[in-house]
Image (cartoon, rainbow, N blue to C red):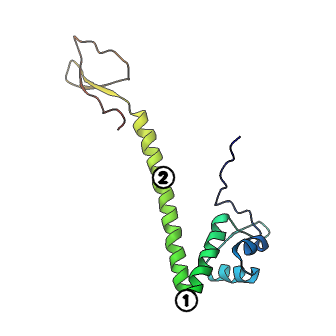
Amino acid sequence: MPEEPLDEEAPIFAIAVAAELAGMHPQTLRQYDRLGLVVPARTQGGSRRYALRHVKQLREVAALSAEGMSLPAISRIIELENSVRMLRGQVRDLEQRLREEMDSRSRVFAAGASGSVVTLRQGTRVRRATEVVVWRPPAGD
């Protein structure tokens, strides 16, 4: 049975585990949370819960900081990355909705006897004496 990929957004790591995975001290994670650099989810009791995505961000913050980048600059980079991630998700959702809409629009149009446009279901036969097919959307579009 194939394994499902790990959800990068699932808040599953306590602060000690996330700190160990990121190679940092838990106090550093608390500081980054206070500064808004890497903000984890919270349980009902207020405990921090980090997702795999947060651990990756923590590693990125450490690397950028080691290269001499300031924390405000790192914060801006993370903010932009979060915006890009959100927008990519929206584009993915819109593309899916568009595919579903296009699949549901597999229609054939005909001209009625009075000249009106008539929508026919796929596979419906046209009565030649009263209707003529005038347009069909291209397959796959």
Residue 46 visible somewhere in the drawing: no
Residue at disc 1, secondary structure: loop
Q: Which image quadrant for residue 126?
A: top left
Q: Is residue 6 above or below residue 129?
A: below
Please name the amino acid that badge 1 sits on.
Gly
Q: Which image quadrant for residue 10?
A: bottom right
Q: CA distance from mark 1 to mark 2?
A: 35 Å
Q: Position of residue 4 (x, y in %)?
A: 67, 48
Q: Position of residue 21 (x, y in %)?
A: 72, 71
Residue at disc 2, secondary structure: helix
Indicate which disc residue 92 carries.
2
Q: Is residue 83 above or below residue 32?
A: above
Q: Is residue 72 above or below residue 87?
A: below
Sequence-first disc among 1 and 2? 1
Q: Is residue 108 above or below residue 49?
A: above
Please name the amino acid that badge 2 sits on.
Arg
Q: Nearer the viewer, residue 81 or 119?
A: 81
Tell me if mark 1 has few (under 14), some (14-19) or many (20+) residues whose alpha carbon lies within 10 angstroms of its own. few
Report the mark closest to the observer, 1 or 2. Answer: 1
Q: Which residue is mark 1?
A: 68
Which residue is found at the position 35% from the left and 28% from the top? 107
Q: Position of residue 44 (x, y in %)?
A: 77, 66
Which residue is found at the position 24% from the left and 12% from the top? 128
